[in-house]
Image (cartoon, rainbow, N blue to C red):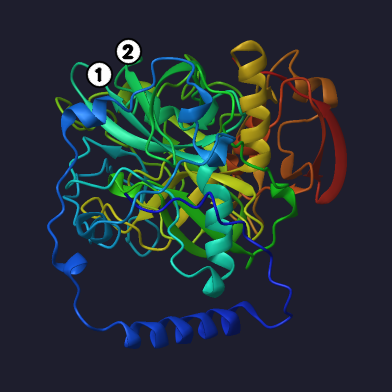
Amino acid sequence: MTPSPEDFTPVPPTSSEPTASRAKAARERAMAERDISEQPTTARRATATPPSPAATSAKVSTGASSSSTIPPAFGGSPASSPEPTAASSFRSRRLVVPIVAALVAGAVLGGASGAGIAVLLVQNPSQQSAAVNPQQGVVINNAAAVNDITAVAAKASPSVVTIQVSSSSASGSGSGVILSSDGYIVTNNHVVTLDGATKSTTLQVEDSHGQLYTAQVVGTDPTVDLAVLKVDGVSNWTPIEFADSSKLNVGDVTIAMGAPLGLAGTVTTGIVSALNRSIQIGSSAVPDNQGSTTPDQGGLGDLWNFDFGQGQGQGQSQGQAQTSQGSIAIPVIQTDAAINPGNSGGALLDTQGRLIGINVAIASAGSSSSGNIGVGFALPSNLAKRISSEIIASGVATHGLLGASVGDQGAQKGSTSVGAVVKEVLAGGAAEKAGIMVGDIITSVNGVPISSSSDLTASIRSLAAGTTTDLVIVRGGKPQTITVTLGTFK
């Protein structure tokens, strides 16, 4: 089994030396130690034996466990460590080569150059992989040489889980983040519904110690592609620490954790590439009026308009569900940390190990490409915190409604600016009550810049119903601020 991090307590570096310098020093120390141990050993030549089905099934939780079975990181008593064997030493170092399953892909409207961009949900549908060591804790072989990323991963690892999803006709996998010590988990809606194929799924959660549990869906929110699960019989899980995603800066370091291609406990790093971004993705279970002429939905004719081909997986045909489900606009953090199929619902972290986002989608240069190209997206942690809290409290979450049909100002003939231009105002709606008029150009919501109708929809939907917010509009060439109390999107 891969060593667990329960005996490692990350200590924030006290040196003022830059992270890159410390990382370089750590690599040099690691190289020196490797030079000393170049002689081949029995452990490196040993053949790993995969666990038997009986051994695997024994890990499934059947309810509350005694304290002796609770992993140390979750508050239980540390178990005695057996002497390492050749096989177990080999398993902790072996390379696993996954068989990559096809990722859901779809058509996209290209830009002026004709180049297309697709945004892909980062679930791993129809998981097919080689045998993988189920233990997903962060391995610390040399505590004296850890860098900042290692410390973050060790801190957050107990709060990130792998989710296996199956139905009578399809299967897939994704990731999730622990919200509470008693078993609440947040993930993506497209993970638990197999890209909108079905609500009748069986969910199995694997924690960072390789323990398996059955989970139930508490509630889903397809409007922003989030869902909350509950595992019963646990009380010592380690909840994630939330950061304030509104305080992020472009260039901040990001660390992504999850189970890409079913490889649990994978850690990648990058930076915040862009903020105040919105994308349109195919919905896994759109509300009845989404994608119609609902006011403030806006036009779908921008770069991020594409079809997913939902329900991709065993027994599913590409495109069978998407036509009736429409699209949703969501606010996202863009990052170049490697995100791949299976990372859906996993954590995007800051350098203190705090949650800044829930990984949700990746961009692809074409429908034939399904892997990371350095353009990934995560739902902001502030949004995930609000939605999950409302679902836990009442089973559902709310979203704001402006009550105005809008279009892209930049697409208007002769336009010299961007924003969301008001095309129609719904009688009795929030926009009319606030004095918004046809022809007004909305350029900001609650301080967030608006450059398109998609931006406006994403910003309004991210706010709770009944929220009072400030909109900056341009009317007759002059900007002004209007305060709006949002309606309820249904």
Q: Is residue 397 toward the left or the right of residue 469 in the image?
A: left
Q: Is residue 124 toward the left or the right of residue 241 in the image?
A: left
Tell me if residue 280 comes above or below residue 88 in the rendering.
Answer: above
Would residue 484 be seen by someone viewing this image from the given angle? yes
Q: Nearer the viewer, residue 75 or 20?
A: 75
Q: Is residue 437 toward the left or the right of residue 351 in the image?
A: right
Say which residue label 2 marks: 200
Quarter of the image for residue 53 reads top left
Q: Is residue 266 toward the left or the right of residue 411 in the image?
A: left
Specify the amino acid type for callout 1.
Ser
- What is the spatial separation of the Cα atoms under label 2 and label 1, in whole angstroms? 6 Å
Residue plotted at (72% across, 43% down): 441
Specify the amino acid type for callout 2.
Ser
Say which residue label 1 marks: 167
Tell me if residue 305 comes above or below residue 483 in the rendering.
Answer: below
Residue 175 in picture, x, y percent from top left:
42, 39
